[in-house]
Image: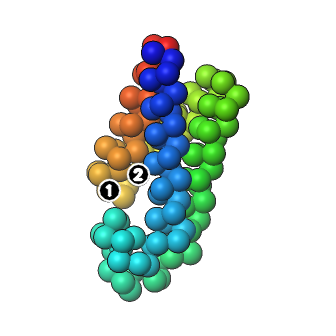
Amino acid sequence: MGLVASVLVGLVALLHFYILVLEMFLWTTPKGRKAFGLTPEFAEASKVLAANQGLYNGFLGAGLVWGLVRGDVATQAFFLGCVFVAGVYGAATASRKILFVQAVPALVAGIALYLA
């Protein structure tokens, strides 16, 4: 079960690095606009805010990788909790889709980590 938990934590980290790329570098591109359902005008007007969001998502991914590299379950659990809370908040305030893209994977990884 430890291997399964590590793989799931790694996948959540990779997801957040992907979100970093979307928000920091692809926000105004067709791929970025499609991912977030943005008009070209809104994407251009909000690109600095999106880059900031992307940086925070990168920190979440980095924290998860740090916990994996150190073999530190508490660090992994902390960052999974952060991802979960961010996902629930994002679902409540921005898009319900965030619940399934961000919060649910973090919850599943957290459960696997607990069971390991």
Which residue lies most toward the right here?
70
Q: Is residue 105 above or below residue 56?
A: above
Q: Amino acid at mark 1?
A: Ser
Dot placed on the residue nearer the N-terminal end, 1 or 2: 2
Which colour assignment does the render follow? Answer: rainbow
Q: Kindly tell me whether residue 9 is visible in this rendering.
A: yes
Decide which of 3, 26 is in the foreground and name it: 3
Q: Quadrant of the N terminus?
A: top left
Residue designated by label 1: 95
Numbered label attached to residue 90: 2
Decide which of 54, 31 is in the foreground and name it: 31
Q: Residue 100 location in percent, x, y?
A: 31, 43
Does residue 17 appear to the left or right of 100 in the view shown?
A: right
Q: Residue at x 67, y 32 (%)?
A: 69
Q: Residue at x 41, y 31 (%)?
A: 107
Decide which of 29, 103 is in the foreground and name it: 29
